[in-house]
Amino acid sequence: MNDFLRIPLGQWVENGIDFITDTFGFVFDFIKLIISSVADGMNFVFTSPPFWIMLIIFAVLAFVARGWLFSLGTTLGFLLILSLDQWENAMDTMALVLVAAAIAVFISVPLGILAAKYRTVSTIVKPVLDFLQTMPAFVYLIPALILFRIGDVPGIVATVLFALAPGVRLTELGIRGVDSEVVEAGQAFGSSPGRILRQIQLPLALPSIMAGINQVIMLSLSMVVIASMVGAGGLGQPVIQSLSRADVALGFEAGLSVVILAIFLDRLTASFGSGKGYFRFIIESFNVRGRRAESAAVDAAANSDAATTEPAELTPPVR
Amino acid sequence: MVVSQWSCSESAPLSFPTRITQGFDRALRSTRTVIERSEALKVPSNQENVTEKFAVSAKNIYKVFGRRPNEAVERLQHGASRDEITELGTAAVIDASFDVLPGEIFVVMGLSGSGKSTLIRMLNGLWDTTSGTVTVGGDLITGISAPKLRDVRRRRISMVFQHFALFPHRSVLENAAYALEVQGIAREERLARAQKTIDLVGLKGWGHKMPSELSGGMQQRVGLARALTADTDVLLMDEAFSALDPLIRREMQEQLLELQTELGKTIIFITHDLNEAMFLGDRIAVMRDGRIVQIGTPEDILTDPANDYVAQFVQDVDRSRVLTAASVMEPVRATVFASGGPRAALKVMRDLQTSTAFVISRDRTLQGVVRDADVMKLVRKGVTDMTTILSDEYNAVDENTYLSELFVPSVESPLPLAVIDERGRLKGVVPRVTLLAALGNVTTDTGELQVMEPPLTVSTDVITDALDASDTSSDAKEDAR
Ligand SMILES: Nc1ncnc2c1ncn2[C@@H]1O[C@H](COP(=O)(O)OP(=O)(O)OP(=O)(O)O)[C@@H](O)[C@H]1O
Ligand SMILES: [Mg+2]
């Protein structure tokens, strides 16, 4: 086609990767050791209890997050997975997703905070994120495979890279979106930057950050399935099997299980961010009770020399 | 400390007594300020001492946003105009200098974009000055380290924001306690102290609510409580009332004055509303395009604008709420001493061709008015005591009354309004013509005042005859003795 100018870019990258594996192999072995032990631990947590214990835990979580309807749907969904004989795989996937998403969150949220605070970090991180997000997902698998060899670890590493972007973006956006006058108010009363971050910026950016975490989890799920190509366990295995064997039945069953997991994880994590359901209610009522007791105590202290104390307000505040 | 409670209902109409006492409060305040001001000016011109005397002091401060701010400042210092340096940056504040006295309400006023917010943010170091120095209570706050600056903000200066800037995730009480939390004060104590300021601003019982459950006016009270809890001497308020509707705004203004009288805070108040500036300010700085074009008392600004810009700016102000009786009154012409007797009174009235005269005692305390016909009767009867004919058919007003409150008494009384000081001494008069002229910003010529006094009801000849007659009769009495 074009024999005039062919830049061997791919070759260079390959050489680079070779060089890295040769020189820093021990570093990657170390990383692999840590990640694989964490993943094994998580896997143990999900797969060792009998299914009904896990089912009850999921149902209760669902109830707390959004109420009885979601809880019922969750129960039916997981029973369906069980009856499709994908329970083991689903739990493997769940464990992988949680490990990958946790690592991604641990990297992306602090990175987002830095990007919100320093313009330079933001300008450097942005194109890198664009690159990570638009690169075809399979491409991550290749260097991951070379660096960490086959198994769960390259899958997790590829997943983390793929899922990082929304965590960073939405954290940065959330913190930048906090009303600058409110931040100024913190400064005007002499707060240190750390205190402002902890007490003002992070709490107010929380809905946005939670939306980011939700996205991270969803992307992790989709990538974990793909990562089975490099030997990661879970629902990806039957999907890839069915692909190579043109097994429609197996493919559909495994795919449906992924969809059920996705819906469950999405609704669950979304409710933490948007403050729906009993999860929020429990926290709130706890807070309000604490606050009311406190203000009553303050009133009492303020009026201690007066003969009467204010009657405590009994009706809950309208929200 | 006696601290009055603010009323909690914000839509309640202003109570009548509040309005009446307002003028007096203000008079007290301005008297105090004048005393303090003169004290401040007595300090020898030693630079250090002078700045310590001031609550806040800004010296030639500049703020330029843009790529080459320092170069821009240099050009500005060499006389370049704001428009000439636009390629170097936006000059938001140019060469601003002022000193704010302790206990003063210093208002900065100007149109949108004139640099008010930039100026106030340099006073507590939220933004650095590009050039120039700011001292707060004698401490230099420009060019100091961040921890030191935070320390100054905790101890000396707090702020109320235009859009309230409350922490939406904290209760009203926790909002109010924020400054103390930052200062590291234990939870119990800071909440108890915050509760006190919450009560002070009239939000008793609202402490456990979230800010979003409050109306705008109440939210701004929380903002005020938050700043007051910090218990700093200086309070910065950036268009603190601009987001409130007019009724609540007026109420907040009055309550701010009340509070300032109680607590004696130094307040730097930003506004683009001239009426608000005139109402609140002990002194006003008018800003235009980043420069301070005039600093003066509300009356200075109104009656003696530094340039056309200020004049145009103040054109629309409600003068009747700024000018006081004392600032427009005319000298009294027809006054007679009670001890002088009817004969002397009648002579004065004949000479001035007026049918009425104010009667004052030796220390100028106003006793009443007398009419020519009554005085003449006394003269004819040879009575020497005028108390029997003293009439109270006149209206007297305190010298600090605003013009807006002079209309009714002025209409009710056929005579010019008598202006008296707090000890009841006659200081001057406000004829109706003067009142109208003051509102229309027209100068009156005092020479023409005769037309405004009721002319004699008895002809001059008759008076002269009566005086002569009484003269001879008193002579006769003396002869008889
Ligand atoms: N962060 C900034 N960066 C660049 N220019 C700014 C910045 N802040 C303010 N300016 C400019 O400085 C000038 C003064 O702005 P400032 O906000 O102080 O005005 P203001 O008098 O407070 O106006 P308003 O009544 O609208 O609040 C404006 O021309 C504005 O564009
Ligand atoms: Mg402003």
Image: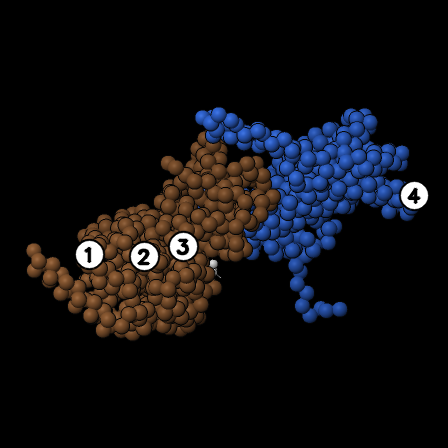
Chain colours: A blue, B brown
The N terminus of chain B: image quadrant? top left
Q: Is residue B325 left or right of residue B337?
A: right
Q: Residues within 10 Å of mark 3 (few under 14, many from 20)?
A: many
Is residue B205 found left or right of A228 in the rendered image? Answer: left
Q: Judge depth for marks 3 and 2 and give the one in front.
A: 2
Same chain check for tags 4 and 2: no
A279 over B369 or under it: above or below: above
- Front-most of residues A234 and B330: B330
Tag 3, which chain? B
Q: Which residue is mark 1?
A: B384
Are discs 3 and 2 both within one chain?
yes
Nearer the camera: disc 1 or disc 2? 1
What amino acid is labelled 2 in the image?
Answer: Ser
Q: Residue at x 64, y 37 (%)?
A: A317
- Image position of A308 with respect to B302: above or below: above
Between tags 1 and 4, which lies in front?
1
Q: Where does label 3 land, which residue?
A: B280
**Secondary element type, mark 2:** loop
Q: Amino acid at mark 1?
A: Thr
Q: Amino acid at mark 3?
A: Leu
Do callouts 1 and 2 point to residues on the same chain?
Answer: yes
Q: Which residue is label 2 attached to?
A: B391
Please say if the residues under marks 4 and 2 sit with CB atoms less than 8 Å apart: no
Q: Earlier in the sequence, mark 3 or mark 2?
A: 3
Task: Bin the neighbour count of mark 1 within 10 Å (Cα to Cα): few under 14, some 14-19, many 20 and up.
Answer: some
Asked if ligand 1 lies within 8 A of label 4, the reply is: no
